Image (cartoon, rainbow, N blue to C red):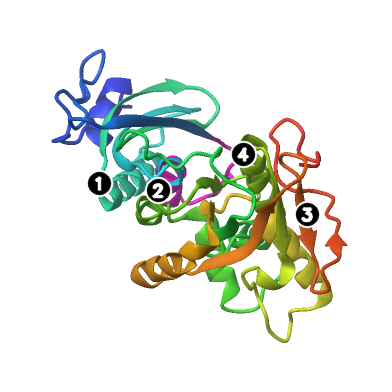
Amino acid sequence: MAGEFALIAKYFARPTPSAVLGPGDDCALLQPSPGKQLAVTTDMLVAGTHFLPGTDPKNLGWKALAVNLSDLAAMGAKPRWVTLAGAMPAVDEAWIAGFAAGFFACAAEYGVDVVGGDTTKGPLNLCVTALGEIEPGQALRRDGARVGDQVWVSGRPGLASLGLAQLQGRINLPEPWPRLCIAALEKPRPRVALGQALVGIATAAIDVSDGLLADLGHIGERSNCAAVVKLVQLPYLPKGESYNAELRCLALECLLAGGDDYELCFTAPGQLSLAIAQIAARLELPLWNIGEMVAGAPGEVTVLDPDGLPVSFAQHGYDHFEPAAQS
């Protein structure tokens, strides 16, 4: 059985042309581009909490990196380097090979070098730190939204949660939604190009990881304003003959509170809506104007039905220590 350092050398030691010094020493040595600021983020994925035990290791490798690149995307940063730390209960080389293949496929797709990390024995747990670069003063932060800004979201939030419900046997989605939703759950696409395109346009941004309403609430809280979301302006989700009232209700709950989407929610002045539409066309990515920032209690998000009446939702998003808590 291969030992720790042999496993690292076999599966995770790759060339790192952008680093002064890559894996193999006590630290990596990195040289940021002249005049750039570093954006740094860390996320972990825990078996049973963030992914199902039988998840394809190649998809898991992709997702472990993608969720961190999504944080860089939300800041408008260009991804540069990542480190990977992982615990596993036993050595399974076939699993490790699949995971490494997915992880490095994502790294290649988004142009990042893996410059270090660690392995240990324990419950399956994956922790990635990602570093990106951005011009000083240009980062998309959560505290820049203003009353009157429009609220936008990319892609179709809710697909990942519907994919999880499909895998758990809680629903039976009509075709072709099972494939689309499970792909959204297991192999998310971090919106790196969108984040960079929004620099100088968006006033605030966040990636949708814990639920659209909850994450929009974080923007409002940091920006000292409230938000209104209009049901008629939300992205559409599964439709078809088997799309009954129960599925429609679950789809809406997943869209607004499901999380694990890694889409971007952002705010921008209304006069920039044409520029945003041009970005959507250039990236071939749907961008939805779903509401606006308003005066009110910081962080409060109100959902309005087609008649303009408020709709109550028991849960706005996911909290690791209070899963049933309201946002």
Judging depth in this view, the residue of 311 and 202 nearest the camera is 202
Q: Residues within 10 Å of mark 3 (few under 14, many from 20)?
A: some
Which quadrant is the C terminus positioned in? top right
- Count of labels in the image: 4
Identify residue for label 4: 223
In this view, the mark in front (3 or 4): 4
> Is there CB contact under 8 Å for labels 3 and 1?
no
Q: Nearer the viewer, mark 2 or mark 4?
A: 4
Q: Amino acid at mark 1?
A: Gly
Q: Which residue is mark 3?
A: 302
**Residues tagged 3 and 4 counted as in contact (Cβ below 8 A):** no
Q: Secondary structure at mark 2?
A: helix
Q: Residue at x 23, y 21 (%)?
A: 28
Query: Which residue is outermost to the bottom?
Result: 241
Q: Quadrant of residue 114?
A: top left
What residue sits 66% from the left and 43% below the top? Answer: 220
Q: Whole-percent x and y of residue 273? A: 49, 66
- The numbered mark, 3 or 1, whose residue comes first in the sequence reads 1
Q: CA distance from mark 3 to mark 4?
A: 16 Å
The amino acid type of the residue labelled 2 equals Trp
- Could you tell me if residue 63 is visible in this image? yes
- The region drawn magenta spans 45-70
Residue nearest the observer in this picture, 75 or 314: 75
The image's mark for residue 111 is 1
The mark found on residue 62 in the picture is: 2
106 relative to 8, above or below: below
Q: Residue furthest top?
A: 26
